[in-house]
């Protein structure tokens, strides 16, 4: 396909993607202009580049090289002079972007009251003052079908065998399908996750400025695409000198309104894979955020004695000298466990029993009794009533979604921040790092107040100062130095883990980095998570016997609820903040105009969205989709089927040839057959011949029967000398040899 044909396809998909009843004159004019730009020569007599293709490639250069608007303006001005007279080179970056706006890639600016009371939106769009506080309104003066196919991966390619690899394997997803079977019947309906986080766009914490963003993540995509940046949908940018807090609901109104419409009515959408229109609906699975953000979105205050949302009105927290501690994890042990009667934990035995289940009905009962709250930071609203029992500050705007109240997992506890806080507390306490250690003088006073662990009590000297006995878990200076020296020598294979040696400074005793290996596995089983839930309770109870009570803050306590969330929501890597935090770093680099950082980010984001779609229609442009691998292999490759065109560079020393077991050989063969795109017609043909009276998963049946069927089918074609039975297809059907060459690493 020529570049001209691909440009025509880009324009055609854009037009087909519009609702068929869109007949407004302005839209018709935009489509006509877009089609005209796709055919107009860059200058008379030059047919290789149209004006549309030229603009696309120039803006791609701008994004890939982080070129400023001024730099691109100078390049366009030079090209206008160099190229023959009559050329159509845009005069500026602004004019170039205007051409792309006809592709429908733009954003809408919505004004908000300066006190965060209401939006100037819908029926209030033309008001000059806020309806709530009457404050004056601010005047702002400043590939074809592949992704559609990927959106069906969870239904077409996912293997449902009881192992959680994807959000579609989670209990929350499956329970939602049972409650809403009409939604589940259309596999192209979209499941979304909502992420919110705040950051300083200037990278300078001395600058008092906070920007909050809201991102939507589509979960229909296969695992290798779900949490990737090109598929993040930046839905809201909330600039403010201060955090939005509970007033984030004011900003979420447009988004919730659209989500409600997508649930109830849907929107007519063009499926580029099946070449048809359909009514697409969408639902929100859950929200992702750090713990303060958890409170802003959910309406549950994450401070005080009731800071744990899952424990709700039955917390096990106590007041300590410097903080509130969660030091009663023995309540989660079986009633017959001998640690319940031990006095080594907090000097008392524990008789109460606690469940880790979250009672959705109980939460809904309390929210039903909540009074209406007026949101906003107007001075008259400073003494806002603290509302519902025991720790509710509002009813989240997400409850306006019809399906929201029945969900078990509404808001995720972020594993990344829990992991970070526990790692810092653990290493800080063991290594005695100032400012990070929980073994402080106040922690020793806690032991005195509770009258246990007498050997660790502070000893008063004659001069009035105190002697602090060394705890057995703390390392001596020599042991600490040896530990740091060991870490500085640790090396991992490239891409396996971060370079921990760069995070170690033996002089000031600083260390960063840790992980929850079992919880963060890429594949999870419910039985293993139930065991992990029991293990975490035992680990916390064991730590309570030795560690300072101040160690057990709410972030440490939250670990006890993480396995249960994994049972409901599936693999952790689809519900944590790691990719979002990396994305925030990229957004900071988009800020060119420090007076209007939100405008810089919005403009750069729209341009990036355009570039993410262009590779589907135009070849020969380097983008995030086709960049070379960081470590590219340059081995030999052959033409033909994708599986035979892969390259691999052999490393290490050659060892003797080895033999694969029959089970491993069958697994490898099935993987190639199932994931080779050229074999999809054969897989579909075989699927149509299957009968499934037992209701067994169709993929499991194909795994057992398709290799034999495909081998016999290819052999028959080979005997009849059919050109369909190519050498590569016949080889793939008959499977690999069991002999492999082994190399040392």
Image: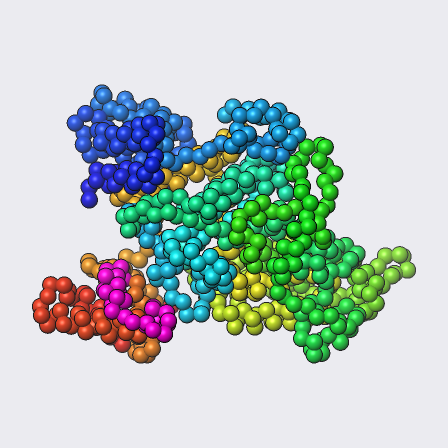
Horizontal arrangement in the rendering, residue 249 relative to residue 54 (left or right): right
| Quarter of the figure with the N terminus | top left
Of residues 381 and 474, the one nearer the viewer is 381
What residue appears at the point 27 percent right and 48 percent down from the top-left corner? 275
The residue drawn where x is 35% and y is 62% is 157
Residue at figure coordinates x 61%, y 59% from the top left:
360
Question: Which residue is outermost to the top?
Answer: 85
Whether residue 217 can be seen here:
no
Q: Nearer the viewer, residue 672 or 693?
A: 693
Q: Check the picture and name the quadrant holding the C terminus.
A: bottom left
Instruction: Please give left or right for residue 387 compared with residue 655 in the image.
Output: right
Residue 370 visible in this rendered orientation of the protein: yes
Q: Which residues are magenta?
A: 676-701
Q: Is residue 687 magenta?
A: yes
| Residue at 79%, 56% in the rendered image | 321
What is the number of callouts on the image? 0
Q: Residue furthest left?
A: 721
User: In the rendering, at what x and y percent does residue 130 appear?
Assistant: 61, 28
**Location of residue 87 in the rendering, given as x and y in whole percent from the top left corner:** 24, 24
The answer to whether 489 appears left or right of 99 in the picture is: right
Residue 695 percent location from the top left of the image: 37, 71
In the picture, measured across the screen, residue 425 lies left or right of residue 449, that is left
Answer above or below: position of 494 versus 254.
below
Q: Quadrant of residue 446?
A: bottom right
Q: In the image, residue 412 lies at what x, y percent?
A: 56, 55
Please, what is the dominant secondary structure of the magenta stretch?
helix
């Amino acid at each position: 396909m020529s570049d001209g044909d691909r440009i025509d396809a880009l324009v055609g998909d854009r037009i087909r993607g519009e609702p068929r009843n869109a007949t407004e004159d302005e839209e018709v004019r935009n489509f006509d202009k877009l089609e005209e730009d796709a055919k107009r020569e860059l200058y008379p007599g030059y047919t290789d580049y149209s004006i549309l293709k030229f603009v696309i490639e120039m803006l791609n250069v701008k994004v890939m090289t982080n070129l400023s608007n001024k730099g691109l303006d100078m390049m366009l001005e030079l090209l206008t002079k160099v190229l023959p007279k009559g050329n159509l080179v845009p005069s500026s970056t602004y004019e170039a972007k205007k051409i792309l706006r006809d592709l429908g890639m733009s954003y809408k600016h919505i004004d908000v009251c300066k006190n965060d009371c209401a939006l100037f939106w819908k029926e209030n769009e033309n008001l000059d003052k806020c309806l709530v506080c009457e404050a004056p309104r601010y005047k702002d003066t400043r590939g074809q079908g592949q992704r559609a196919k990927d959106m069906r991966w969870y239904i077409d390619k996912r293997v449902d065998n009881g192992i959680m690899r994807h959000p579609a394997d989670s209990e929350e997803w499956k329970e939602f399908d049972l409650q809403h079977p009409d939604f589940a019947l259309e596999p192209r309906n979209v499941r979304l996750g909502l992420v919110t986080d705040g950051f300083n766009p200037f990278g300078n914490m001395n600058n008092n400025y906070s920007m909050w963003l809201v991102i939507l993540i589509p979960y229909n995509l296969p695992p290798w695409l779900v949490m990737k940046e090109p598929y993040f949908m930046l839905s809201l940018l909330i600039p403010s000198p201060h955090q939005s807090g509970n007033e984030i609901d004011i900003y979420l109104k447009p988004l919730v309104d659209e989500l409600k419409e997508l649930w109830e009515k849907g929107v007519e959408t063009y499926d580029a894979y099946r070449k048809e229109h359909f009514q697409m609906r969408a639902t929100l699975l859950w929200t992702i955020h750090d713990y303060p953000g958890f409170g802003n979105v959910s309406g549950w205050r994450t401070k005080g004695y009731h800071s744990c949302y899952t424990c709700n009105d039955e917390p096990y927290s106590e007041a300590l000298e410097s903080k509130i501690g969660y030091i009663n994890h023995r309540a989660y042990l079986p009633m017959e466990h001998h640690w319940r009667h031990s006095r080594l934990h907090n000097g008392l035995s524990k008789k109460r029993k606690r469940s880790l289940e979250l009672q959705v009905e109980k939460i809904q009962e309390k929210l039903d009794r909540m009074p209406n709250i007026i949101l906003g930071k107007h001075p008259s609203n400073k003494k806002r009533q603290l509302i519902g029992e025991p720790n509710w500050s509002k009813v989240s705007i997400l409850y306006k979604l019809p399906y929201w109240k029945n969900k078990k997992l509404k808001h995720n506890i972020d594993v990344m921040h829990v992991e970070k806080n526990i790692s810092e507390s653990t290493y800080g306490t063991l290594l005695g790092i100032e400012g990070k250690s929980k073994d402080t003088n106040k922690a020793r006073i806690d032991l005195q107040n509770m009258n246990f662990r007498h050997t660790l009590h502070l000893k008063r000297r004659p001069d009035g100062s105190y002697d602090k006995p060394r705890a057995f878990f703390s390392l001596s200076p020599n042991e600490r130095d040896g530990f740091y020296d060991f870490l500085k020598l640790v090396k991992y294979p490239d891409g396996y883990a971060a370079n921990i040696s760069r995070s170690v400074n033996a002089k000031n005793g600083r260390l960063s980095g840790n992980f929850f290996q079992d919880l963060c596995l890429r594949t999870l089983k419910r039985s293993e998570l139930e065991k992990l839930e029991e293990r975490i309770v035992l680990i916390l109870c064991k730590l309570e016997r030795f560690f300072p009570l101040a160690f057990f803050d709410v972030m440490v306590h939250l670990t006890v609820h993480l396995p249960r969330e994994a049972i409901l929501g599936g693999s952790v890597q689809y519900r944590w903040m790691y990719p979002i935090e990396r994305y925030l770093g990229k957004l900071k680099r988009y800020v060119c105009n420090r007076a209007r950082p939100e405008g810089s980010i919005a403009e750069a984001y729209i341009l990036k969205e355009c570039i993410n779609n262009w590779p589907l229609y135009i070849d020969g442009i380097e983008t995030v989709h086709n960049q070379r691998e960081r470590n590219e292999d340059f081995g030999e490759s052959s033409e033909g089927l994708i599986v035979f065109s892969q390259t691999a560079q052999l490393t290490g020393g050659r060892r003797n040839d080895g033999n694969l077991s029959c089970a491993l050989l069958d697994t490898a063969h099935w993987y190639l057959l199932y994931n080779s795109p050229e074999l999809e017609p054969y897989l579909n043909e075989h699927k149509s011949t299957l009968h499934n009276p037992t209701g067994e998963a169709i993929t499991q049946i194909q795994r057992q029967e398709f290799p034999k069927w495909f081998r016999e089918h290819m052999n028959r074609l080979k005997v009849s000398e059919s050109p369909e039975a190519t050498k590569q297809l016949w080889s793939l059907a008959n499977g690999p040899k069991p002999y492999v060459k082994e190399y040392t690493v």
